[in-house]
Image: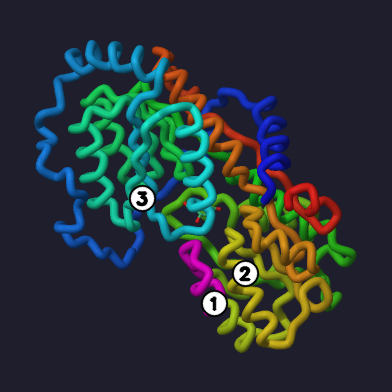
Amino acid sequence: MKLRKVLAIAMASMMVFGLTACGGNDAAPAEAPAEEAPAEEEAAPAEEEAPAEEAAPAEEAAAEDADAAADAAGAGGNIGVCIYKFDDAFMTTYRNALQEILEGKGYTVTFMDGKNDQAEQNNQINNFIAQKVDALIINPVMTSAADQIIATVKDAGVPTVLINREPTADQMSAYDKLVYVGCDARQSGTMQGELILDTPNKGDINGDGKVSYIMIQGDPENVDAQYRTEFSVKALTDAGIEVEELDLQRGDWDRNKGQEIAQNDLAKFGEDIEVIFCNNDDMAIGALQAIQAAGRKVNEDIYLVGVDALDAALNEVAAGNMTGTVLNDAQGQAEGAVQAMEDLLGGKTYAAGEQSIYVDYVKVTPDNVADFQ
Ligand code: BGC
């Protein structure tokens, strides 16, 4: 995606940028996902020897923070960034944007790969605290671990921006130097549904009076997966369309899993599948491979939508191989996260219920895809 265009979109998003109460995420399930945890303890980062207990008590830390904040806000500071796993297409774009912005502003940044393992990420957070970073930006591995993460950073008094995986407003209210920057996932789900409603037959390709779909879900522990799944279908039913769910399976945001699920479902349900909803583009690209291998043609005998506006997906939308996608504005969110971090470093605190900052999603269709390429 060309940076200038993205920046323009980011600027537009920033204009509607505002502090909004995080009202919608109270339904996040506590249930832990069955991840394949590669959790060898020795995989902890090299700076392990710095003991976490050394973290100063809250008041001392607060005084130190004030100094650190003054330094950090001016001539750069040390920022620790924890990403849930580097091997995620969208988070790679996001990470690159964060790096460019932070380094461009003169900060020293260290990125850690959580490898999709919360225990590993906890170690990384503790190490950053022991190294006395000025601020943390954290993309949690599991939102169900948010209480623990928040207690840890609060105890150390480190200003923290959470990104991409939104905890509940209640969880965040425990610490006033904590803010979440992301998107309202309900909006992306609704836009996916609208992409289908905008097709000539509103998704009912075979004219049987209902839209039969399969849903390829991200990691269901993640509120983005929950809301996109719910609100994409809700957009159809709210418009009075009858729907039939042929299958719903978790693809964990992963291209290969998207491909496998679509391949199996295409073999099982064949022509009955009219729409494939994917919670993200990487899984949609996988699904597209299966669609093409099955001799089906997107926008003629099947519809396919994703979320993110990855470069690869934009190319497929332009080529007519995806019905559409939804821009998940990595650049805008990275800008917002850095802004929020600087506000925290400048001493800003956030009241309970006002700790979520949302950047808008944008619908992408063949008509406007060129604006994003
Ligand atoms: C993105 C996915 C990504 C996930 C990671 C979502 O917002 O759409 O592509 O895998 O975040 O948490």
Q: Which mark is residue 302?
A: none
* Left or right of residue 294, residue 151 in this image: left
**Disc 2 on helix, strand or loop?**
helix
N-term-proximal mark, 2 vs 3: 3
The label on residue 261 is 1
Q: Is 159 or 245 nearer to us in this picture?
A: 159
Q: Nearer the viewer, mark 3 or mark 1?
A: 3
Distance of label 2 from label 1 (alpha carbons): 12 Å
Q: Is residue 252 magenta?
A: yes
Of residue 23 and residue 358, the one placed in the foreground of this image is 358
Image spot of residue 29 (x, y percent): 40, 50
Residue at figure coordinates x 14%, y 45% from the top left? 48
Label 3 sits on a secondary structure element that is loop
Q: Confirm or reject: label 3 Cβ below 8 Å from ligand 1.
A: no
Q: Earlier in the sequence, mark 3 or mark 1?
A: 3
**Horizontally, is 266 left or right of 219 in the view?**
right
Residue 141, label in figure: 3
- The location of residue 255, given as percent across then percent down, is 53, 69
Q: 257 or 45, which lies in front?
A: 45
Question: Magenta region: which residues?
Answer: 249-260
